């Protein structure tokens, strides 16, 4: 709520106007009102005296009331206006009306300035609100960009840090496969080295823990063996003759591949099965039987 502060000069002008009005009222009372009342009383007294003289039926109480009223008027003291020293020259009606007109115009100007100030303040508030909203949106966007950048930096650091460990896992896989080969090569006259099974179980345990640690940063091994060949995630390093039902499938894995949130960290090196007696696929627009029309 806006509070309009009245200027000092306006307060002084208002006090001066009130004082002049008060003097004018006293002057009117002294110069016009009391003489008029005395004239009316005198006129009525004469009228009543004339009627009393003419009327023999006038009652005594009326005569006594008239005498008492005359005595009261005679005893009434004249008001003292000397303290105010009011005179017609000190305050005339034209000057007073002029001052009031000027005061009215000044108040109108003050009101116009107040309205203009209110409009300017409203525009300033709207501009401030728009600037605040734009700053807030910019802050949100910058915060979002910083969060995305932080996520990318963290992801890149995790990826860079995890890449050497992928080779370490491949070494563990090769060691595990070697222990399995040694275990399978034992025969009746040939025994497997002592403790080879424990070593194989140790490799398996290490691989499980390794995969669990990689899974904590969302790095997972690409499944290859028994899966159709995928050129996006796999790299065929060799082919192997297989039966018809395994044609186009991965039969061996030489190097494991890894994926993280849809990003290929390393492609897998695999051996793809190929059936030698499979039928050749006819080209588009040609018939499988050349004699067919």
Image (spheres, grey):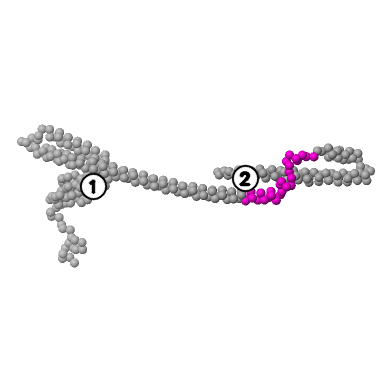
Q: Which quadrant of the view contains residue 46?
A: top right
Does residue 194 sit above or below 247 in this rendering? above
Does residue 176 sit above or below 122 in this rendering? above
- Lower sequence index among marks 1 and 2: 2
Where residue 225 appears, x then y in whole percent? Answer: 18, 46
Q: CA distance from mark 1 to mark 2?
A: 83 Å
| Any part of residue 242 in sight | no
Q: Which residues are magenta?
A: 78-105
Q: Nearer the viewer, mark 1 or mark 2?
A: 2
Please tell me the numbered disc located at residue 264. 1
Q: Is residue 212 magenta?
A: no
Q: How many marks?
A: 2
Question: What residue is at 10 percent from the left and 38 percent from the top?
Answer: 182
Question: What residue is at 23 percent from the left and 41 percent from the top?
Answer: 161
Name of the residue lying farthest toward the bottom: 293
Q: Which quadrant of the view contains residue 257?
A: top left
Where residue 177 appears, x then y in whole percent? Answer: 14, 40
Question: What residue is at 20 percent from the left and 40 percent from the top?
Answer: 165
Circle 2 sits on which residue? 10
């Amino acid at each position: 709520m806006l509070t309009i502060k009245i200027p000092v000069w306006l307060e002084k002008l208002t006090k001066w106007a009130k004082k002049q009005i008060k003097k004018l009222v006293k002057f009117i009372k002294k110069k016009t009102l009391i003489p008029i009342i005395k004239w009316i009383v005198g006129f009525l007294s004469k009228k009543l005296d004339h009627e009393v003289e003419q009327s023999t039926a006038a009652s005594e109480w009326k005569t006594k009331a008239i005498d008492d009223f005359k005595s009261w008027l005679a005893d009434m003291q004249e008001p003292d206006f000397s303290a105010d020293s009011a005179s017609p020259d000190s305050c005339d009606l034209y000057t007073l009306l002029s001052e009031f007109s000027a005061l009215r115009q000044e108040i109108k100007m003050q009101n116009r300035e107040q309205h203009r100030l209110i409009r300017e303040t409203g525009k300033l508030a709207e501009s401030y609100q728009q600037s605040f909203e734009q700053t807030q949106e910019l802050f949100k966007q910058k915060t979002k960009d910083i969060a995305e950048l932080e996520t990318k930096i963290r992801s890149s650091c995790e990826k860079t840090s995890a890449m050497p460990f992928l080779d370490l896992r491949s070494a563990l896989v090769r060691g595990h496969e070697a222990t399995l080969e040694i275990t399978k090569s034992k025969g009746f006259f040939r025994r497997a080295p002592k403790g080879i099974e424990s070593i194989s179980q140790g490799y398996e345990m290490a691989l499980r823990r390794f995969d669990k640690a990689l899974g904590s940063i969302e790095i997972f091994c690409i499944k290859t063996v028994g899966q159709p060949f995928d050129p996006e995630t796999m790299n065929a390093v060799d082919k192997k003759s297989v039966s018809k039902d395994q044609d186009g499938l991965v039969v061996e894995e030489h190097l494991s591949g890894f994926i993280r949130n849809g990003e290929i960290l390393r492609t897998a090196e695999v051996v793809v099965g190929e059936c030698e007696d499979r039928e050749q696929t006819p080209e588009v627009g040609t018939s499988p039987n050349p004699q067919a029309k």
